[in-house]
């Protein structure tokens, strides 16, 4: 990734993959989701929907996107967006900003398109994510957390020759994520509620947009780490605000909400659930030992949130298992 200060600020590259994005983002509808699910099914199988095992929660289903290529839901939106760009646009390469999982999905997508992948990553990212990105052929640039968010807020990708794929505000990415809603209702048409983890809000915009379009009565629980809850604070304030951010859930550690996304998120969320880190780690451990499923902390967040709401209140529910990018050290720590 080029140093932002070295290139012309007017932008000289292939720009944003979602250059047509408008100021206020419209979530995808059911038709968008069906089309995306069809496109993605040609590339990988739907993720399994599992009954939560004993002790994990009654009337609870788990959507295991941890088992998708690259180990997270991100491959849905990133591949769907990248696959629709012309050869000419992607020729110089693809870039993103990521806590790790978007980068892994981008490297996978770039490999399929035969072009290079670049990503800004926080220098505090788990080694499993940084090394995973490198091993997949990606070129990481490690920066401080403030520098990473400055890059996003100031649109510094405009200085680069690559096509930038924004993980939260790109409607093409939301559409890819919305494929999850189609897979869900195909197998479990009678669900009452869905628990979705929130970082920047891209996943929730895609999945909840399609679900609410098809079944407006489905309740959406937005799950955030208690120590990093920008959506919760924004909904209370009635506008996009920043919030303190201290959590083990590195994938969901986003200290602010983007203004373009706030109206969509506010219209889709029925309730927020804030989960202390200890509860998330306990759930990740239970998923490993009882369900035999590996999750990173953010990947277990939605399940931990569902466990905090009584089954009588939430009805038949689905929790999204969103990521499994954890190495031996992370698993060892969980078991200590
Ligand atoms: C494992 C995992 N879960 C949840 C999220 C949150 O997704 P979003 O940023 O689209 O809200 C992320 C984001 O990177 C993630 O990696």
Image: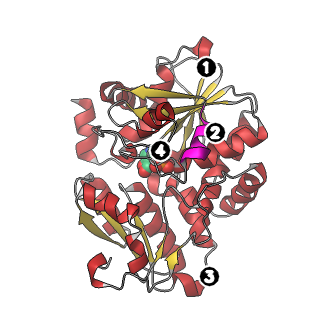
- In the image, residue 43 above or below residue 293: below
Q: In the figure, residue 265 lies in which quadrant?
A: top right
Quick one: label 3 or label 2, which is nearer the N terminus?
3
Determine the secondary structure under disc 3: loop
Q: Distance between the residues labelled 4 and 1?
A: 27 Å
Please name which of the two marks, 3 or 2, marks the residue nearer to the observer.
2
Please name which of the two marks, 4 or 1, marks the residue nearer to the observer.
4
Return the residue at label 1. 314
Determine the secondary structure under disc 4: loop
**Could you say where residue 204 lies in the image, as x and y percent from the top left?**
57, 44
- In the image, residue 289 above or below residue 38: above
Residue 118 lies left or right of residue 220; in this view the side is left
Quick one: label 2 or label 1, which is nearer the N terminus?
2
Q: Can residue 3 be seen in this view?
A: no
Tell me where the magenta segment starts and ends, as one range: 262-269
Rendered image: mark on residue 240: 4
Quick one: label 2 or label 4, which is nearer the N terminus?
4
Q: Is residue 13 visible?
A: yes
Residue 226 in magenta stretch: no
């Amino acid at each position: 990734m080029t140093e932002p200060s070295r290139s012309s600020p007017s932008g000289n590259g292939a720009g944003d993959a979602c250059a047509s994005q408008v100021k206020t983002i419209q979530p995808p509808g059911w038709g968008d989701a069906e089309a995306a699910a069809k496109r993605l099914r040609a590339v990988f199988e739907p993720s399994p929907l599992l009954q939560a095992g004993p002790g994990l929660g009654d009337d609870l289903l788990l959507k295991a996107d941890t088992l998708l290529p690259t180990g997270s839901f991100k491959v849905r939106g990133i591949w769907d967006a990248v696959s629709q760009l012309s050869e000419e646009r992607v020729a110089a390469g693809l870039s993103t900003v990521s806590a790790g999982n978007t980068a892994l999905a981008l490297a996978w997508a770039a490999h399929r398109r035969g072009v290079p992948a670049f990503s800004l990553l926080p220098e505090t990212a788990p080694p499993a994510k940084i090394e995973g990105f490198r091993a997949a052929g990606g070129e990481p640039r490690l920066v401080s957390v403030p520098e990473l968010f400055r890059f996003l807020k100031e649109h510094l990708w405009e200085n680069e020759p690559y096509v930038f794929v924004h993980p939260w505000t790109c409607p093409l990415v939301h559409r890819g994520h919305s494929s999850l809603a189609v897979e869900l209702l195909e197998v479990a048409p009678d669900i009452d509620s869905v628990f979705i983890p929130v970082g920047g809000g891209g996943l929730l915009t895609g999945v909840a947009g399609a679900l609410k379009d098809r079944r407006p009565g489905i309740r959406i629980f937005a799950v955030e780490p208690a120590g990093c809850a920008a959506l919760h604070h924004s909904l209370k304030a009635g506008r996009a605000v920043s919030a303190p951010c201290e959590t083990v859930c590195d994938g969901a550690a986003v200290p602010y909400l983007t203004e373009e996304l706030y109206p969509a998120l506010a219209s889709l969320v029925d309730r927020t659930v804030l989960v202390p880190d200890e509860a998330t780690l306990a759930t990740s451990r239970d998923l490993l030992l009882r369900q035999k499923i590996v999750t990173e902390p953010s990947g277990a967040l939605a399940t931990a949130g569902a466990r905090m709401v009584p089954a009588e209140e939430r009805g038949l529910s689905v929790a999204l298992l969103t990521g499994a990018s954890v190495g031996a050290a992370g698993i060892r720590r969980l078991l200590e």
